[in-house]
Image: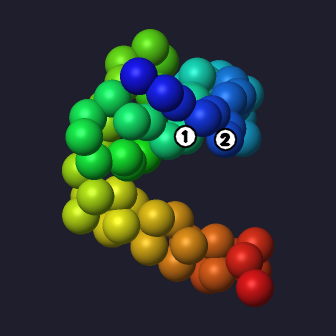
Amino acid sequence: MATTMYFEETIHDQSGKTSLDIEFGRSSFYPEDSIYLTVDGKTVIMDRATAKRFVDAVISVGQYHGLVD
């Protein structure tokens, strides 16, 4: 399986009381390359349709908050 990690970080809640370990990238584990997401050690490799909805949603939230042009 070839992977390319694009993001790896422990994300802390603004209160500082809760955190998640997150890793995100691309995976070729299955015949169709797609996005993998690992949260607190649990990994999913999305099918392409789910990956597209996920990316669209992340972009929309980023645009809402002025984080994406």
Q: How many marks?
A: 2
**Which one is nearer the viewer's eye here, 2 or 47?**
2
Residue at screen point 52% across, 65% down: 58
Residue 56 circle label? none
Residue furthest out toward the bottom: 69
Q: CA distance from mark 1 to mark 2?
A: 5 Å
Q: Secondary structure at mark 2?
A: strand
- Which numbered disc flags the more N-terminal residue, 1 or 2? 2
Q: Secondary structure at mark 1?
A: strand
The quarter of the picture where residue 67 lies is bottom right
Q: Rate crowding at label 2 as few (under 14), some (14 to 19) or many (20 or more) other CA atoms within 10 Å.
A: few
Question: Quarter holding the C terminus?
Answer: bottom right
Residue at screen point 67% across, 41% down: 6
Percent across and percent down for residue 18 are: 59, 24
The quarter of the picture where residue 7 lies is top right
Q: Are marks 1 and 2 in contact (CB under 8 Å)?
A: yes
Instruction: Identify which amino acid the numbered label 2 is placed on.
Output: Tyr
Residue 26 visible in this rendered orientation of the protein: yes
Q: Judge left or right: residue 7 versus residue 53.
A: right
Q: Rate crowding at label 1 as few (under 14), some (14 to 19) or many (20 or more) other CA atoms within 10 Å.
A: some
Residue at screen point 35% across, 57% down: 51
Instruction: Identify which amino acid the numbered label 1 is placed on.
Output: Gly
Residue furthest out toward the front: 31
Q: Which residue is mark 1?
A: 25
The quarter of the picture where residue 17 lies is top right
Percent across and percent down for residue 45 are: 32, 36
Question: Quarter holding the N terminus?
Answer: top left
Residue 36 visible in this rendered orientation of the protein: no
Residue at screen point 26% across, 35% down: 30
Q: Which residue is mark 2?
A: 6
